[in-house]
Amino acid sequence: MLEVQSLTKMFGEKAAVDAASFTVDRPMMIGIIGRSGAGKSTLLRMLNRLSDATTGAIRFEGRDITLLKGADRREWQSRCAMIFQQFNLVPRMDVVSNVLHGTLNRRSTLATMFNLYPQADIHKAIEILDRLGIAEQAPKRAEALSGGQQQRVAIARALMQDPAVILADEPIASLDPMNAQIVMEALRRIHEEDGRMVIANLHTLDTARRYCDRVIGMRDGRIVFDGTPQQLTTGVARDIYGAGADFSEAATSTEIETLDRTGPRAAVPA
Ligand SMILES: Nc1ncnc2c1ncn2[C@@H]1O[C@H](COP(=O)(O)OP(=O)(O)O)[C@@H](O)[C@H]1O
Ligand SMILES: [Mg+2]
């Protein structure tokens, strides 16, 4: 259903993503791992058409996504929802309105201007919030919620679009261990119960191992591993994360976590 073929993104002379190819034939939950700068975000942004590929193709159900323009491109972006590390909510707006923003693509300018939402959409928003365990937060301002709750609001906003694919760029990198677990479990459940494809950039190996059916490892823009969590041995991990780090089996997760950490970030469960 998804076929990425020799996808490349150049920034000047540098290939941020270098001839990446992979095929997904059913709605899996896929984790993309690799050091900071490996090209994970650029890959997701191309899939969502937030960023244009330099060369290569992305086919979803046979259609080349890289060629879509205007309304077709926006329609693809609503079928392929994106979740970010920093949630990207409107902080001062209430939770329900943030979730209803997920329907913007299909609303008229006038309705948007006057903040008019169909009753059915409001019901749907509350239902989705309820499913994610945060219905009681609906009237609060987004900024009043904890990080984990905000990320669930962002997931609810994505679900409003009824997406076939959910792309999550480091969805738990700013969360404490407990909230990280809640968010990963929510994504997993959405994948299993709704049959949606989930592709998540993850900065810890253990999270990818625990929640994903398949793991793609990137290094310097290239895909250097594509397999099951079971196939992701310490040797393979060393290859993905490079740096000549000498991981012992026991130290693997902590060391890799440290290697991939770009700046100050909350700890994520091992
Ligand atoms: N807008 C941009 N302009 C120039 N270089 C960029 C831009 N975005 C990303 N890069 C570069 O592309 C490479 C991959 O970045 P990125 O996709 O953000 O990696 P990751 O998400 O794995 O940390 C990095 O070397 C980064 O500096
Ligand atoms: Mg990134």
Image (cartoon, rainbow, N blue to C red):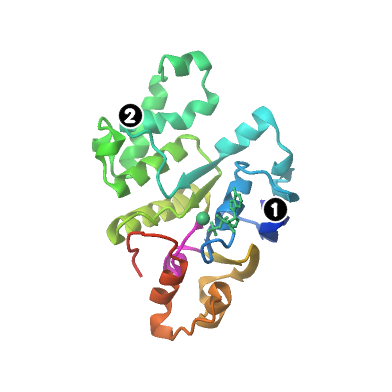
Looking at the image, which residue is at 49% across and 63% down? 212
Q: Which mark is residue 93?
A: 2
Q: CA–CA distance between discs 2 and 1?
A: 37 Å
Residue stretch in magenta? 200-212
Q: Tag 1, which secondary structure?
A: strand
Quarter of the image where one finds residue 176: bottom left
Query: Could you say where residue 65 lies in the image, as x and y percent from the top left?
Result: 69, 42
For ligand 1, the image quadrant comes to bottom right
Looking at the image, which residue is at 26% across and 30% down? 139
Left or right: residue 25 versus residue 268 is: right
Quarter of the image where one finds residue 72: top right
Looking at the image, which residue is at 31% across and 49% down? 148
Residue sitting nearer the eye, 16 or 12: 12
Residue 251 among those drawn in magenta: no
For the C terminus, the quadrant is: bottom left
Residue 206 among those drawn in magenta: yes
Placement of 125 over or under 16, stated as above or below = above
Is residue 5 visible in the rendered structure shown here?
A: no
Placement of 74 over or under 193, stated as above or below = above
Placement of 186 over or under 72, stated as above or below = below
Query: Could you say where residue 27 lies in the image, as x and y percent from the top left?
Result: 57, 53
Placement of 159 over or under 220, stated as above or below = above
Amino acid beneath label 2: Met
Q: Are marks 2 and 1 in contact (CB under 8 Å)?
A: no
The residue wearing badge 1 is 10
Mark earlier in primary sequence (2, 1): 1
